[in-house]
Image (cartoon, grey):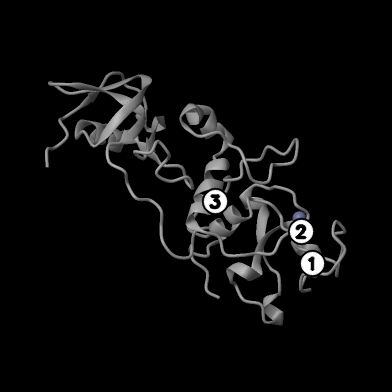
Amino acid sequence: MTPLPAVHRSKPVNLDHYRTLVLNANALPLSTTPLSLWGWKDAVEAVYKKRVQVLENWDGPVIRSQKMSIPVPKVVMCHEFVPVAKKGIPALSRLNCALRDAFTCGYCGNRFAVKDLTFDHVVPRSKGGLSTWDNLMMSCRKCNCMKGSEPANYNGIRGVVRKGNFVPLWKPRTPSWDELYKIGLRNVPAEVRGVFGNWLPEAKGGRPAPLGMRVDATQGWDDDGYWTAELEP
Ligand SMILES: [Zn+2]
């Protein structure tokens, strides 16, 4: 394998702030949750080894060697299509469950940052409910607290949120990987979309966020694996 040439940067700037969006050969991101963003070293190496095509460079930083100079890429595209669709049932993690529910409380219908959501067992564990796709939904802390250890009531009065009348707005179900990918794409954080939005499909479809509720839904999930750990039933 050809080693990357010894480099020096064009200016003493902190390149760690520069991220590169990686698109598959079909022009869609390799992943959406999190969005496929590489650090500058991986991106420059992929360009040097001609594994990717550069679609846009950052304005400014250039990595120079004796023989060549490579601008730090902002957006690259894989030459070959990388199969990203996974087979089978998605792993049941808090993150995937939050994605399936589009960061929306399953009882009051409001959207929240992921850190303000919690898991709700539709049938509580104390009453035999398991941690399964069809028994878990995201709930805001207020609803979760009010619901307490009561089972959700599918026959209750819709739109009335009170103790003993917690009516799920939808029936939880197993999502597909493709569905989670698309929901992730719609929920790319606003500041990331502000930088790379020209290269991302329009954020449309799905349940719209209530007016005035522009939350960064991904806030608070890049922690110690709490959100991504697969759950036991
Ligand atoms: Zn709620």
Quarter of the image with the N terminus is top left
Mark number displayed over residue 107: 2
Q: Residues within 10 Å of mark 3 (few under 14, many from 20)?
A: some
Q: Which residue is mark 3?
A: 221
Q: Position of residue 233 (x, y in %)?
A: 55, 75
Which amino acid, mark 2?
A: Tyr
Q: Is residue 183 visible?
A: yes
Asked if disc 2 and disc 1 are in contact, CB closer than 8 Å, the reply is: yes
Q: Residue at x 27, y 34 (%)?
A: 52
Task: Look at the numbered disc 3 and give the secondary structure of its residue.
Answer: loop
Which amino acid, mark 1?
A: Lys
Q: Residue at x 22, y 24 (%)?
A: 8
Q: Position of residue 218 (x, y in %)?
A: 57, 45
Image quarter for ligand 1 equals bottom right
Q: Is residue 224 visible?
A: no
Q: Quadrant of residue 139?
A: bottom right
Asked if disc 3 and disc 1 are in contact, CB closer than 8 Å, the reply is: no
